[in-house]
Image (cartoon, grey):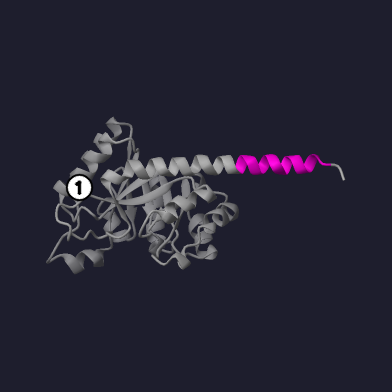
């Protein structure tokens, strides 16, 4: 399953955000998330660009999504900025990796009683374990191994398998790589879902989105989703053949 992330690629403009929402509502995809940044982030940009969407936009987006039986989520990293939208009933939340030790934010998410995707980045097992144990309902938690580098030497897709074994939760892959190689190869470790940042095809080729290098253009998403499904089928066949051979070996009497 592809979970689409607008992030802040809307530049805080409702008209831009609506284009992402309209695409989502007419697509086959079922999950879309926006992002609330830190209060300091907004202060740094307040004289140039806002990057904030209105609460009324989020409420309308959720209403429209529900009519299509789809879900709208929110990625969060700061308890203060999250407090500004805490009265909105998002369907799911994503806790960004920089905040897995933020007790105030974790407590606020825990009180929501909604699905929470915990983005891990390079988080160590001790911090991850503390974060998980801070939630009262572990069944609503899902982990996201996120590659935070464009250097292939830094990508450790085996981490998906390690996290599943260590924490016994659903684990997905959050793609922050500069092309589709890592996300396709991630299927070898059977992630439960994929998070991907999205962007519009710019009329001006010089336009740079906040998540430019690792975001996929809207017109590429169907192809990416089909490619991931194809990769999954190929790997299932390989796994089946491998299991058959193992079973045959077990039957041999020495």
Viewer-nearest residue: 104 or 68: 68
Q: 129 left or right of 245?
A: left
Quadrant containing the N terminus is top left
Quadrant for residue 50, please give it: bottom left
Residue 40 rendering spot, x and y as whole percentages: 25, 67
Q: Is residue 223 above or below residue 8?
A: above
Overall secondary structure of the magenta section: helix
Residue 40 visible to the viewer: yes
Q: What stretch is highlighted in magenta?
A: 239-252
Q: 96 left or right of 27?
A: right
Q: 125 left or right of 180?
A: right
Q: In this view, does 57 lie above or below 213?
A: above
Report if residue 247 lies within the magenta region: yes
Residue 72 visible to the viewer: no
Residue 175 rendering spot, x and y as whole percentages: 39, 55
Report if residue 147 lies within the magenta region: no
Q: Which residue is drawn at 49% across and 42% down?
A: 232
Q: Name the residue under label 1.
A: 17
How many numbered discs?
A: 1
Viewer-nearest residue: 228 or 32: 228
Q: Is residue 137 above or below residue 121?
A: above
Quadrant for residue 26, please give it: top left
Q: Which residue is drawn at 57% across and 50% down?
A: 168
In this view, which residue lies farthest toward the right? 254
Residue 135 rendering spot, x and y as whole percentages: 48, 52
Viewer-nearest residue: 243 or 107: 243
For mark 1, give the secondary structure. helix
Quadrant containing the C terminus is top right
Q: Which residue is drawn at 73% across and 40% down?
A: 247
Q: Which residue is drawn at 18% across and 49% down?
A: 54
């Amino acid at each position: 399953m592809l979970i689409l992330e607008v992030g802040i690629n809307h530049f805080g403009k409702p008209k831009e955000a609506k284009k992402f929402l309209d695409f989502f509502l007419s697509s086959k995809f079922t999950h879309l998330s926006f992002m609330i940044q830190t209060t300091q982030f907004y202060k740094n940009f307040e004289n140039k660009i806002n990057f904030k969407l209105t609460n009324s936009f989020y409420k309308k987006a959720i209403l429209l999504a529900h009519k299509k039986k789809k879900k709208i989520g929110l990625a969060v990293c700061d308890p203060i900025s999250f407090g500004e939208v805490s009265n909105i009933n998002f369907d799911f939340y994503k806790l960004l990796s920089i905040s897995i030790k933020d007790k105030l934010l974790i407590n606020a998410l825990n009180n929501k009683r909604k699905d929470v995707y915990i983005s891990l980045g390079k988080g160590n097992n001790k911090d991850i374990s503390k974060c998980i144990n801070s939630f009262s309902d572990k069944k609503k938690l899902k982990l996201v191994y996120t590659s935070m580098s464009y250097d292939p030497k830094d990508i450790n897709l085996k981490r998906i398998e390690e996290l599943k074994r260590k924490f016994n939760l659903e684990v997905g892959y959050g793609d922050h790589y500069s092309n589709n190689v890592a996300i396709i190869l991630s299927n070898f470790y059977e992630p439960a879902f994929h998070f991907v940042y999205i962007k519009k095809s710019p009329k001006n080729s010089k336009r740079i989105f906040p998540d430019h290098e690792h975001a996929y253009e809207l017109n590429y998403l169907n192809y990416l989703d089909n490619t991931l499904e194809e990769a999954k089928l190929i790997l299932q066949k390989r796994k089946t053949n491998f299991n058959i051979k193992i079973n045959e070996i077990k039957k041999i009497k020495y």
